[in-house]
Amino acid sequence: ELGLYQEAHRPQFHFTPHEKWMNDPNGLVFHQGVYHLFYQYYPEDIVWGPMHWGHAISKDMVHWENKPIALFPDEHGYIFSGSAVVDTNNSSGFGTKDNPPLVAIFTYHDPVGEKAKKDDFQTQGIAYSLDNGDTWVKYEGNPVIKNEGIRDFRDPKVFWNNKTGNWTMLLVAGDHLQIWQSPDLKEWVKVSEFGKNQGAHGGVWECPDLFPLKVEGTDMEKWVLLISINPGAPNGGSGTQYFVGDFDGTTFKSDQKEHKWIDWGTDNYAGVTYNNVPNNERVFIGWMSNWAYAQETPTEKWRSAMTLPRKLSLQQINDKFELFNYPLDSVDEIRGPVASEDITIGPKLDKSLTFDHFNKSEVKFKTSSRAFSLDFQNSSGEHLNLILDSEAQQFILDRSNSGKTTFDEDFAKNVQIMPIPDLPNGEYEVRVLMDWSSVEIFINHGQYVMTAQIFPNEFYRNLMISNPSDMELKLDTFTISPIKSIW
Ligand code: FRU
């Protein structure tokens, strides 16, 4: 009998529920010393169903403790995605100033009820907890935002707005963002809209988030809007775009023309950031899957994992603002002993390295090269190929022969391509974090990022590094580190 968290493909250093179906992260908030992770959860099966909020807590966003289900469906519907706030001044009256309530704001999805004139009737509701998330009471006045007939009206992200001194809610309505305000989390008015004519619109808008970031090395502050869309991502299915702009407290504006993506891999969706992180860091967690095949991936006991927690930062490169995302420092703590060497590979030559094993490891190096290939291989002939192609200015992830791929025709249909127009001159870092069923690639400290699921039938134990160019390939301080299980 395999013990807990030992099943085939079970991630060893990413969050997964003990069992059953999970999708989006919800209610990311820090309160009384713990980071909460709630998530879209269906406790009866390993496919999507009537949604609950599952719950886990952490001190570092890396090690997690599973908690009982926080929110169950009720007469208003399933509990879809949303956020959570600490109501410090007890504006809602649900708690006291000495024990401020944790308030969850979520979408009610009513698939069958009286009000479901359409097949997709959604309203917004709230619930509160006075014991830091252990038990929850739904507000008797729910829903707090009714639906005037909009399809796809969901995923409230609420934060305290210093500019106006009230609560601000982001809500998506099909093809655009709405911004609402409230003094007490109960009475809401709509104040602005964004996006009908901006950004990517290949699919419905979902899971908005909006927050300020300092532009690194300056005093300039910009606001970043995250919008997940499904379908319409650059490598197919679901993906998360972002806009950099300004927020005056009421209205978000951006003059960005191009479409921007936080992650170019197929498997980082519905990601949002934490409220109330103590040092003001902006920390992002996404769902490591894609609606194109999420319900068919080859696991049986549970389905899907979250990305590593990633710190967001903003840089100005040439004339553009770029959002970086990179694992939190706390991820370094689960790394085993590190030994590093400088590697040089001659023109058109290869080098093979063995390690036991890569599916719980970090591979990291610095290079100024514009062309290399990393091929992770196992003894069944399966391999995952990562290629930097200087001529095309692309990074390519090819999982077509990486292991189990035929559970859905979309999974390995195409190689995944990430344009890399602005790699810095000189050395930059390449960092690959690989778990039993995922790979996360961070180039230049999170400027270029790809996240993808993989299901190798055996662990990869060989890494073939190839130099396609006519010049020497130099990989400096090349390290392979084992990663410790978090469970
Ligand atoms: C995103 C999403 C949300 C919705 C939830 C339902 O993956 O479709 O828009 O609230 O999943 O589970």
Image (cartoon, rainbow, N blue to C red):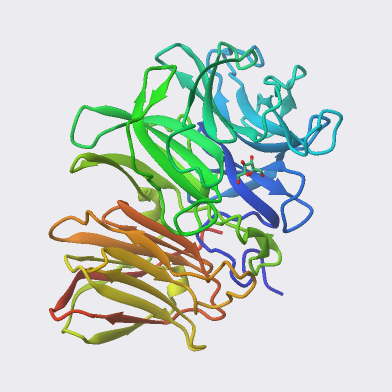
Visible residue check, residue 281: no
122 to 443, vertically: above or below = above
The location of residue 293, given as percent across then percent down, is: 62, 62
- Label count reads 0
Looking at the rendering, in which quadrant would you find the N terminus? Answer: bottom right
231 to 103, vertically: above or below = below
Q: For the view shown, which residue lies furthest in the right direction?
A: 114
Picture quadrant where residue 199 is located = top left
The location of residue 478, given as percent across then percent down, is: 24, 71
Q: Is residue 31 left or right of residue 283?
A: right
Give whichever of 335, 394 is nearer the camera. 394
Image point 56% across, 46% down: which residue? 203
Picture quadrant where residue 294 is located = bottom right
The location of residue 308, given as percent across then percent down, is: 46, 53
Picture quadrant where residue 283 is located = top left
Give whichever of 384, 410 is nearer the camera. 410
Give whichever of 416, 379 is nearer the camera. 416
Q: For the view shown, which residue lies furthest in the front direction?
A: 197
The location of residue 125, given as percent across then percent down, is: 69, 25
25 to 108, vertically: above or below = below
Give whichever of 130, 474 is nearer the camera. 474
Image point 23% across, 27% down: which residue? 220
Q: Is residue 336 left or right of residue 453?
A: left
Looking at the rendering, in which quadrant would you find the C terminus? Answer: bottom right
Visible residue check, residue 184: yes
Image point 41% across, 40% down: which residue? 242
Q: Is residue 117 left or right of residue 164?
A: right
Q: Quadrant of ligand 1?
A: top right
